[in-house]
Amino acid sequence: MSELAWQFGINHAPVKLKGQLGIVYISLFLHVFNFDQQVTVAKPVLDLMAAEPGSMIVCRVVMCRDQDTLNATTARLPYYYHDLASWGRLWERVQKETGIKLNLESWEQEDALAKKHPLQGIYVLGSSIRRD
């Protein structure tokens, strides 16, 4: 078991809920982990979903339009803010590692706090990750 899994108890989904949920909602959560940790965290979240087409994760994530600006500052640390490309890569990797086919849909959401962020280009993305 990885250190992250042990620390957060995420080596598996809660037994009673495993495979039982049609919709799993997570909001403003994944960005507190680095990219590799997000892959680790996503797997037990997927385990909660029913193993049938249409089961989904619905989430909100903090995003950044310009990764160069983001990488040039320490103002965001320790958070990992995706851009659209890295958000897609996250779910591609999760699919590859789990063998679960997913359909990712995303849309920008208004968010007053994101507008006040000191870095330019920070916004909130709504997303659904649906099992095919």
Image: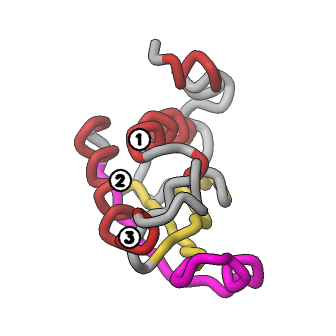
The residue that appears at 64% across and 25% down in the rendered structure is 8
Residue 92 position, x and y percent, is 27, 53
How far is mark 3 from mark 1, CA to CA? 19 Å
How many C-alpha atoms fall within 10 Å of the one at disc 1: few (<14), some, or many (≥20)? Answer: some
How far is mark 2 from mark 3, CA to CA? 15 Å
Judging by the rendered image, the residue that carries numbered circle 3 is 67
Quadrant of image for the C terminus: bottom left
Residue 119 appears in the picture as rendered: yes
Q: Which residues are magenta?
A: 101-122
Q: Nearer the viewer, residue 53 or 65?
A: 65
Q: Earlier in the sequence, mark 2 or mark 1?
A: 1
Judging by the rendered image, the residue that carries numbered circle 1 is 39
The residue that appears at 52% across and 83% down in the rendered structure is 121
Q: Is residue 98 above or below residue 92?
A: above
Residue 50 appears in the picture as rendered: no
Q: Nearer the viewer, residue 21 or 2?
A: 2
Residue flagged by tag 1: what amino acid is it?
A: Val
Circle 2/circle 1 CB separation < 8 Å: yes
Circle 3/circle 1 CB separation < 8 Å: no
Residue 44 position, x and y percent, is 51, 33
Q: What mark, if any, has residue 90 been given in the picture? A: 2
Choose top left, top right, bottom left or bottom right for residue 26: bottom right
How far is mark 2 from mark 1, CA to CA? 7 Å
Residue 112 lies left or right of residue 104; in this view the side is: right
Q: Nearer the viewer, mark 3 or mark 1?
A: 3
